[in-house]
Amino acid sequence: MSSTFTAEIAATAARLVVEEGMEYGPAKRRAAKILGKQGTRAAELPSNDEVEDEVRVYLDLFCADTQPAELAALREVAVRWMERLAEFRPHLTGAVWRGTATRLSSVHLQLYCDDSKAAELALIDKGVDYDVGGLTGPRGEPVDVLTLASRSDALGELVTVHLTVLDHDDLRGALKPDVRGRTQRGDLAALRTLMNP
């Protein structure tokens, strides 16, 4: 597939990410379909970095007046939950960490637990309603994702918060920067540094 077409998919996916709050994977597949290439193999789709670059361009062009405040509001929600769940070594990841989030984005926190059920018990103790889902963890095995809704006064609406429950040992390799030298996640201190440079 040509690099021009890959770039078109990345740009279309970026629009879906910003305007509809889609995650990168589904946005890339839908973008390929919109552009008439629904049979595109995963290897032919743009990388997440390419989509993220296009998201930043889109935000600069169309959302520069609203996105910074929305990002700040979502980071405040992240801080609140990181403080409440401090015993589980929470790390923020995804668009809220990377600075590309809008009010449609979810907050993604990773919890590093000695006991995989401890986070769930903590939510029950705090009287928090949540749903349990799952995804494939860093070592290829299924991990729980606890999803809850949290009020943002700044946004005037509920924000979806996903808590991915990982093993404590997974934290060791989690803070390595990517090929561009950017980190994929950060703890509460790192987040506060981002919020108050």
Image (cartoon, rainbow, N blue to C red):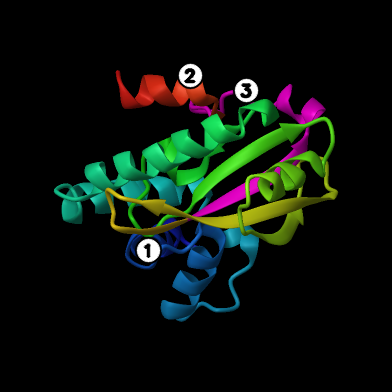
Q: Is residue 179 magenta?
A: yes
Sequence-first disc among 1 and 2: 1
Q: Which residue is mark 2?
A: 189
Q: Residues within 10 Å of mark 2 (few under 14, many from 20)?
A: few
Q: Indicate which label's residue lies in the foreground, 1 or 2.
A: 2
Query: Are dots 3 and 2 in contact, CB under 8 Å?
Result: no
Q: Is residue 3 magenta?
A: no
**Three-letter amino acid code at the position of disc 3:** Lys
Give the side of residue 179 with respect to residue 171, left or right.
left
**Three-letter amino acid code at the position of disc 1:** Glu
Q: For the view shown, which residue lies furthest in the left direction?
A: 65
Could one spot residue 125 in this view of the protein?
A: yes
Q: Residue at x 42, y 79 (%)?
A: 34
Q: Which residue is mark 1?
A: 8
Q: What kind of element bears circle 1?
A: helix
Give me the disc on residue 190: none
Front residue (pair 50, 110): 110
Q: What kind of element bears circle 2?
A: helix
Q: What kind of element bears circle 3?
A: loop
Q: Residue at x 64, y 39 (%)?
A: 110
Q: Quadrant of the C terminus?
A: top left
Q: Which residue is mark 3?
A: 176
**Three-letter amino acid code at the position of disc 2:** Ala
